Amino acid sequence: MHNLFLKRLHVFSFLICLFSGAVFAQAPIKMKIQTAVPSASIYFDLMKNFGERVDKMSNGRIKVEVLPDGAVVGAFGILEAVDKGVVDGGFAWSHYWSGKNSAAALFSNPASGSGVGLDQMSHMSWLKNGGGDQLYDRLYTEVLKTNIKPFMIQPMGPDPFGWFKKPINSIEDMKPMKYRSPPGLTAEIFKEMGLTTVAMPGAEIVPAAQRGVIDAAEWIGPADDMILGFQNVFKHYYLQGLHQSTDVAELLINKTFWNKLSPDLKAIVEASVAATIAETYTYNVYRNAVALEKLKKDFGVTVHDTPKEFFTAFQKATTVVYDRESTKNPFFKEVLDSQRKFAGVVVPYWTKINGLYYNIGTSVPAASPAPAPAKK
């Protein structure tokens, strides 16, 4: 009887240990993502949506915490923070790291469509179908030598040329101004045009304009710009910009963290990234259109066409800067050559077919104002 009791006790103890181990194994994985945008940004909201998808699809096995710019590190410190595991993930733009290698600019922000006519959609097609994602992985592993798994996650362009305190009619009008632009090669292109640029995170732009540090600025688009209060400092808005005709934000995940995820959890993160790409496209169209109407009607913002000479000058400057960079940086040349080869096949078709939508949009009567976004 005593032996039977001991056997049952051992079995019971084993089951308790097994059950405890199962509970422990199911403890949620916490994923902290530091973004380069303030919490008011619509792109912060989209990252929160990403986190909620991961949570639901994993049945709570991954809990994502999305943090605004500056919560742990500043926007320009995100790469190092993710690399060292200070945070598990980061949300920024690859061109923020172009000071480490200029090729980084060609993934999130190929100025003027890399000078070969790529728009937002065809650039994303290059990433997914033209070998771009493979080059993008190599940027972080072989070139920047980081412990990072990268994903392009939010195609948010094309970005407007920007906001001005007074109207401009020519490049000469801009030369006395200090203009906030993205860092890296974009700034080099503007410099080639004879313009003076300043780089700073989005949250710093309006305060800098109020202090007179800058005279003009670009950020992302009407909806996000309005949230940051651009309309309170600037009243002249130029929508067509070549500096970020393609603008794609990225999700960087610490590779040690990534490698610890099971295959099904990795697939869930990847599926959530794909869903966020699709959501960003539709979100941008509606939110930016509604915001632009509000900026004009409620805040007295005047929307201008960008002077045509900017397009020719910017295209020329882009070619000069990119060709010069190609002679100095073999990886930059490899990425640019890949984009140019892809564009040679895709751009003739995609440009022609998109002419259909331009003709539709310009030939129909003006639509009624869109309803305001539903409150969450």
Image (spheres, grey):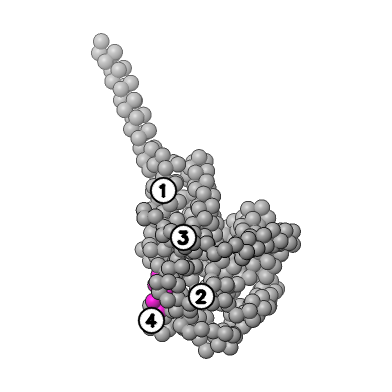
Asked if residue 173 is positioned above or below residue 69 in the image, the reply reads below
- Residue 370's disc number: 3
**Magenta-highlighted residues:** 228-233
- Mark 2: which secondary structure? strand
Point 65% across, 68% down: residue: 114
- Work out whether residue 84 or residue 267 is closer to the camera in this orientation and state it: 267
Q: Are marks 4 and 2 in contact (CB under 8 Å)?
A: no
Q: For residue 18, what is the image quadrant?
A: top left
Amino acid at the residue labelled 3: Ala
Q: How many C-alpha atoms fall within 10 Å of the one at disc 3: few (<14), some, or many (≥20)?
A: few
Q: Is residue 363 left or right of residue 89?
A: right
Residue on which the image places disc 2: 303
Nearest to N terminus: mark 3 or mark 1:
1
264 is within the stretch colored magenta: no
- Work out whether residue 102 or residue 216 is closer to the camera in this orientation and state it: 216
Q: What is the spatial separation of the Cα atoms under label 4 and label 1, in whole angstroms? A: 37 Å
Residue on which the image places disc 4: 210
- Mark 1: which secondary structure? helix
Residue mark closest to the camera, 4 vs 2: 2
Q: How many C-alpha atoms fall within 10 Å of the one at disc 1: few (<14), some, or many (≥20)?
A: some
Q: Position of residue 208 (x, y in %)?
A: 40, 79
231 is within the stretch colored magenta: yes
Q: Position of residue 89 (x, y in %)?
A: 45, 56
Residue on which the image places disc 1: 52
Nearest to N terminus: mark 2 or mark 1:
1
Amino acid at the residue labelled 2: Val
The residue at the far left in this view is: 2
Q: What is the spatial separation of the Cα atoms under label 4 and label 2, in whole angstroms? A: 21 Å
- Mark 4: which secondary structure? helix
